[in-house]
Amino acid sequence: RRRCVVALARTALRSRAPALTTRGADAVADATANANAVVGQQRPRGRSTDARASLDAPDAPDAARDAPARASYDDSSFPKHMRRRAFVSRMRERVKVNDFEGARAELARLVETHGAPGRAALNVTVHAAAKARDPDAAMLIVESMLRENIAPDVSTHVGVMTAFARSGRRREAFEWLKMYLYGVREDGDGVADGREAMEKYDLTHVIGDMIDGDRRRVSRRGLTIMLFTTVMNAAAMAGDRAMVQEIENMMFEFNIPPGADVLHIMLKLERVAGTSASVEEVWNRLPKKARKLKSHQERVVSHAILGRRNQTHAIESRAMALAALKEMYERIGHRRSDEEFEKLAGNNFWGSKHARWTGQRGAEEFNKKLQSDEDIVRVGAKETRMATNTVLDTFALIGDIDTVNECFIRMENDLGVNADARTFNAVLRAEYKHEKLTNKSIDLNRALKRLNEILDEMDDREIAPDRHTFTTLLLANAEQGYMIGVAEVLKIMQERDVQLDLTMYNILLSACANAGDLEPALN
């Protein structure tokens, strides 16, 4: 019923007639209102107003195709939420690419056109403040929503907690979560500044209530897993095991089943406050179907970072990182040979899956009917690059060139994932560390030649070098106090418009100190 009514409403709205009669406009308005009423009654538990609006919004290609047609008739008789969606969608796209000025301009045009921004647009601004790590701005937006008689929803609260978490104020994010779940307690237990500090933000009396006069909002308070994982992730990154455990107990209390995101967060916690053994203990706790590619990535990253510590089990952690990376590669899948695929295609029994790729890529190829290898290798490419680069950085610190080159080649040849700047930086760092450990000094002329070779290869692949690309050679020259070599590196950076950062300025000061030259250091 919901899909049919929404489809009828969209069909009427996308018609290319020059104008709509009053009767037709009223029919579309009634159909849309009924559709939203059905969505409000039957939507999955925990889905916010923003999520529902994004599901009902037209696709971008259709919107671009029908833009001239919609501009040719008067849409003043359409429901307000239908006219607002284009503005809200553009705001989301702006925030996604950190274009906060563009999002603010879209909001201004929305207010100019419709008079009031509405809940969805204000939620976008809350998430923009969260992305900018500005919780105070997010709180001001919530206060403005209350003044305008607009009830904050689940998306609003997730945005506020995200703002606190990203700004390093995880305690306040945790108190906000408890306020949302339980309200402000009479004794003020657990509230940093007492009852008064949180009382004005205690929204338990308006969540799901008719604060905006809309009967469709009358429902039980929404609970989504993001309410918990937002704060849990901040606690895990800080190594706060007690807070993570308390949030996990809250999830059980409110019947929120843990999923792949929780496994990912628990792996982060063990990376910060545990060992490789505890990482594997968490990994083996959940069944295989809950182990998404993102969780595989975090497992590899955790072992690799633990392998950088100067501890007795660092060697074991590095070995476990390689084993986890190999398992992740198998999970992503490889391309079958022609002989293997021909043999597989001979199995014509009912339900057999014929795919040229194995693993997750094979499943995506079969389910989405993918034909091009270029489309298939995008599956797991981001996770593969992140995990492999972290392993390369770990082995580069100990000068293990063989492992670095082996992982580099396997990532590109076996999985078809192209290297990025971080990958090439790890190669330079591994060669520098290996030569320093072997010969106790660096051949600066050879190192400069090697840097130019790497830069040429990056240019051929259209990969822009970053500051870390030049840091290794700059450090090698600084350690020997070779100011001519330092000047050559700075010249190459200037030609490529790469700016110095704080680390590079410190390297330059060390170069001046090793050369015994005070005047350049002061300059």
Image (cartoon, grey):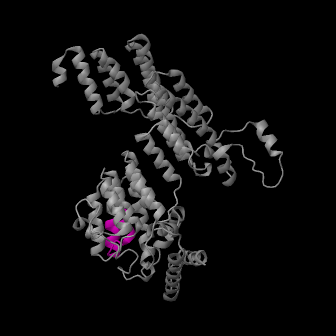
- Splitting the image into 4 quarters, where does residue 78 fall? bottom left
Return the x and y of residue 155 as percentages of the image width and height. 41, 65
- Splitting the image into 4 quarters, where does residue 93 fall? bottom left
Q: Is residue 96 visible?
A: no
Q: Relative to residue 39, is residue 426 depicted above or below? A: above
Q: Nearer the viewer, residue 371 or 69?
A: 371
What is the residue that sits farthest to the bottom in this orientation? Answer: 23
The quarter of the rendered structure image containing the N terminus is bottom right
Which residue is rendered at x = 51% and y = 57% of the image?
258
Which residue is rendered at x = 60% and y = 50% of the image?
287
Which residue is rendered at x = 44% and y = 58% of the image?
249
Residue range highlighted in magenta: 106-124
Q: Is residue 509 visible?
A: yes
Any magenta on residue 388? no
Return the x and y of residue 82 as percentages of the image width and height. 45, 74
Q: Nearer the viewer, residue 421 or 348?
A: 348
